[in-house]
Amino acid sequence: MTLNMQFEQRVMINTNDLPWQASPATGVWRKPLAREEAERGHATSIVRYDPGASFRRHGHPAGEEILVLEGIFSDEHGDFGAGTYFRNPPGASHAPYSKQGCVLLVKLHQFLPDDTAPVCIDTARASWLPGQGNLKVMPLHEFAGEHVALVKWPPGERFHPHRHLGGEEIFVLAGELKDEHGSYPRGAWLRNPDGSEHCPYVEQETVTWVKTGHLSVVDPSADRDRPLPRSGAGSNA
Ligand SMILES: [Fe+2]
Ligand SMILES: [Fe+2]
């Protein structure tokens, strides 16, 4: 079951409108946003653990990236509250669970081969840095042209028109982002392809998770016949 794997196409999903789907683990639910196959390969999802739910021990053959949106997510490494951003590189394994329940943004099987740095940042405590205009930025990760950050928009802020080299993926954490194509409330997921353009702005204070530079249609490490790299075999959770 392939979903939204055409990376040259723009995708916008208000995840609030999607139904929860059962996962292989009891009490763990998902809203798939992009996926290569049912239970392996490239996947981007919203994942919910009901209170007391757990997932079997598993590895991440091409990495796992998580942003805790609500509640507390746990594994043998600790308890991680809303706002925690993780990168579990290839080779890592864990047995996750949640005592009180949690909601996560999860991206699987999308690491560049040499991107092996484990990351764990509590964005509720990390510092905001000055960005362009009146934006504030919290850098989360950077590797080989790929950038991940939180961006805080003050009310009324307008960004300049720009083009996305390597594409742009956005998840709206608070407030509402807008551009000439539409409005994106809290919970909206947006994927702007390589070479796309827009002029984003906000009316109210807005916080977005943003990843850029990872959606190049031509990737030297990939099979040329495939639209995008970082897909393939591997168990998903
Ligand atoms: Fe943009
Ligand atoms: Fe995992």
Image: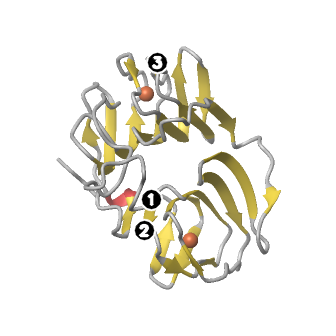
Q: Could you tell me the amino acid type at mark 2? A: Pro
Residue at the left extreme, as displayed: 1
* Image side of residue 37 versus residue 136, left or right: left
Residue at 24% x, 28% y is 24
Say which of marks 1 and 3 sits in front: 1
Residue at 48% x, 36% y is 113
Some atom of ligand 2 lies within 8 Å of the CB belonging to the residue at label 3: yes
| Residue 95 percent across, percent down from the top left | 43, 17
- Evaluate if marks 1 and 2 touch, with contact meaning CB atoms under 8 Å apart: yes
The residue to which callout 2 is attached is 193
Gap in Å between the C-alphas at discs 2 and 3?
32 Å
Which label's residue is closer to the chain start, 2 or 3?
3
Q: Could you tell me the amino acid type at mark 1? A: Leu
- How many other residues sit within 10 Å of disc 2, few (<14), some (14-19) or many (≥20)? many
Q: Quadrant of ligand 2?
A: top left
Residue at 67% x, 78% y is 159
Quarter residue 207 falls in = bottom right
Quarter of the C terminus within the rendering: top left
Q: Could you tell me the amino acid type at mark 3? A: His
The residue to which callout 3 is attached is 94
| Residue 214 percent across, percent down from the top left | 49, 55
57 above or below 178?
A: above
165 above or below 49?
A: below
| Residue 72 percent across, percent down from the top left | 56, 30
Gap in Å between the C-alphas at discs 1 and 3?
28 Å
Say which of marks 2 and 3 sits in front: 2
* Image side of residue 230 versus residue 65, left or right: left
Secondary structure under badge 2? loop
Residue at 70% x, 62% y is 152
